Image: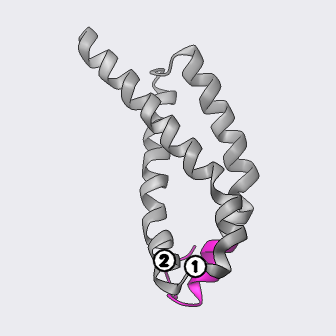
Amino acid sequence: MASVAQQIDLAAWIDKSLDYLMSNWDDIPEIAADWDNWDEDDRLDFVLEWPLREDRLHQLQRWQIDGNLSASQLQRFAELEELIERNTPTLGHLLEDESAIAPGLAP
């Protein structure tokens, strides 16, 4: 059985993951609006670093499946899922646009 300290650490990590992902997914419309002003290197960095966010999301999903999220974290997780659903098409356009510069990087 996990110790109380481990449970507190996990709860804090879940909160940080939710904050991180909410912030990044919330930024997608603003990034898209400014995308044409970004230089090629910045766009490529964004595309190359996006999988780090996906990894964090997959970890959060595993914690949710395992029942590790509190009621308030589950509410925030549901809000995150809505945000992801709303911004996924825009993100897809950004990643597709970058594939012209670096073929094979975008899905």
Residue depicted at x 37% and y 31%: 13
Residue 68 figure quarter: top left
**Pointers 1 and 2 in contact (CB under 8 A)?**
yes
The spot of residue 21 in percent (x, y) is 53, 45
Residue depicted at x 49% and y 69%: 46
The image shows residue 82, relative to residue 39, as above or below, that is above
Q: Which residues are magenta?
A: 93-107
Mark 1: secondary structure: loop
Mark 2: secondary structure: helix
The amino acid type, in three-letter code, at marker 2 is Asp
Residue depicted at x 50% and y 83%: 104
Looking at this view, is 9 or 103 the one in front? Answer: 9
The image shows residue 11, relative to residue 51, as above or below, that is above
Local crowd at mark 1 within 10 Å, few (<14), some, or many (≥20)? few
The mark found on residue 67 in the picture is: none
The spot of residue 49 in percent (x, y) is 43, 65
Q: Is residue 2 visible?
A: no
The residue under label 1 is 38
- The quadrant of the picture occupied by the C terminus is bottom right
- Figure coloring: one colour
Residue depicted at x 49% and y 63%: 50
The answer to whether residue 54 is magenta is no
The image shows residue 70, relative to residue 99, as above or below, that is above
The residue under label 2 is 42
The spot of residue 63 in percent (x, y) is 45, 30
The amino acid type, in three-letter code, at marker 1 is Trp
**Distance of mark 1 from mark 2, alpha carbons?**
6 Å
The spot of residue 102 in percent (x, y) is 50, 87
